[in-house]
Amino acid sequence: MQIVNEHRRKDIHNSDIPTVCAACEARHGGVCGTLTPDQLLDLSRHSTRRSIEPGREVVGQGETTDSYANIISGVVKLSKVLADGRQQIVGLQFAPDFMGRPFTRESALTAEAAVNTDICAFPRNVIERLVSEAPGLEHRLHEQALKELDEARDWMLTLGRKTAQEKVASFLYIIATHIDPEQGTANEFDLPLSRADIADYLGLTIETVSRQITKLRKENVIRIENSRHVTVPSLERLMHVGGID
Amino acid sequence: MQIVNEHRRKDIHNSDIPTVCAACEARHGGVCGTLTPDQLLDLSRHSTRRSIEPGREVVGQGETTDSYANIISGVVKLSKVLADGRQQIVGLQFAPDFMGRPFTRESALTAEAAVNTDICAFPRNVIERLVSEAPGLEHRLHEQALKELDEARDWMLTLGRKTAQEKVASFLYIIATHIDPEQGTANEFDLPLSRADIADYLGLTIETVSRQITKLRKENVIRIENSRHVTVPSLERLMHVGGID
DNA sequence: CGATAAATTGAGCCCAATCAAGGCAAGTGG
DNA sequence: CCACTTGCCTTGATTGGGCTCAATTTATCG
């Protein structure tokens, strides 16, 4: 873990954008976009940039969430587990999503990096103070929540009503359309999730995921190299196989 | 939350509360709770109370949502359909939930009354105006969105990882814990959903739902009369069968 | 009471889970 | 460098839970 300690360049002229933020890819998309330079400076003083390795847990189920974060780059899995160990991934967060559950101290989820992930974390009290000062910030958080709600409901349709084949195709489509431009294109990318993760996301087993990927490959819907690198000749075709209108 | 008009606050007889609202069961729980009497009056001028019969569509998938509503009593199903007709219920809303999707004109869902349902509807422009005037209102809507998000994610675990038996038990538990006190208790109530609805909610077929209900009955987890009236001797037992901690 | 919808029950089948074996690539230590 | 391990993925054989199709019973309502 690395902590960047260089908050800003000029102490006096605080109307400038803080240095850490100026180069930040998430500055416009995340929560930071609605803040004034002053507020951004305020926030940046209390923020820490961290790198998280795959599999590293960010927040455990039932633990106290003491911080919020913007995802700078990478992918984070949000998951829930049953008492007997059965697991379900209930959300994937891509850059530049905001991560964290406002107004609750208990997290009902486990958040875990799927690949090497950079985040910019803030303590909860700073966020809550800024919310009360800047009404636009709560609006942004509200919109993020509504976006996640829409995504969750779309996925419920996939979990409840689609076949294994459609599920895998839908998953590939999601990744294709959310991939960081620096990591690949919609037509060619590396999967950020292992087969086990994909299974947990789709409510399937590893074996079924593997078989369906093989099937899609044999039907020329996708090409695969090294089991992680995917090429999609036609996104249209992939959508169609995934039962997406 | 701060009270602006002190002189109105001390009126015990609620004479400043609009007549329609004074007797409204949803006045404290819904969005109305955060409004001042002035704002409540404003809202009530533009609100219409409606009764909706079961099966009646409130807002169709892809249609323009021109209004928001508080549910006074009843249950509303939110569902999504695939091109070939496969359907999934992605949310149930009970009184006094707020219904409607802020900041989007296109609804991605179909909303339909499951039983006789009374709602209090407002045009979207009035709500949006009030949001800009009363910051507490957006906070309330935000919390409602977060609540729905939590529920959606809980249900994703059910859809993706639970067995048919556990799904049905989980469904019964949800109903038991959300039933309107005037309609029944957690231990005895009428199901607000048909077998077909339950199947769509659980990602199962009607037949499987029926078989599992029969199984739960034979195992004395529940008793059933007239296929709708349910008695639950032990909620603990029901939770356990449903895989809920 | 008859008509119609809703729910139950049964038989057989199929898709995905389970159980089991083996491949492949990257490390590790002799 | 090679044997061995380890993690991850694929493939095969078999099983079983839930789906499909079909018949019957039960509720609802004119």
Image: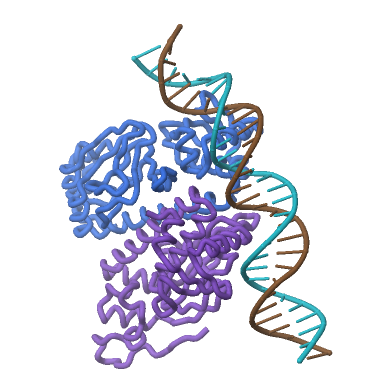
Chain colours: A purple, B blue, C brown, D cyan
Residue shown at 27% from the left, 70% from the top: A134
- Picture layout, residue D10 above or below residue B166: below
Residue B45: horizontal and vertical position, in percent?
15, 42
Position of B238 with respect to A233 (left or right) is right
Residue B25: horizontal and vertical position, in percent?
32, 38
Q: Nearer the viewer, residue D28 or A98?
A: D28
Residue shown at 63% from the left, 55% from the top: A83
Quarter of the figure with residue C22: bottom right
Q: Nearer the viewer, residue A104 or A121?
A: A121
Residue shown at 49% from the left, 55% from the top: A166
Residue shown at 40% from the left, 55% from the top: A244
Residue B112: horizontal and vertical position, in percent?
35, 39
Quarter of the figure with residue A180: bottom left
Q: Is residue B139 visible?
A: yes
Q: Which residue extends farthest front?
A: A219
Q: Quadrant of the C terminus of chain A?
A: bottom left
Quarter of the figure with residue A38: bottom left
Position of B162 with respect to A174 (left or right) is right
- Picture layout, residue A122 above or below residue A2: above
Q: Nearer the viewer, residue A226 or A89?
A: A226
Across the whole image, how many numbered discs are drawn on residues? 0
Q: Is residue B151 visible?
A: no
Residue A220: horizontal and vertical position, in percent?
50, 64
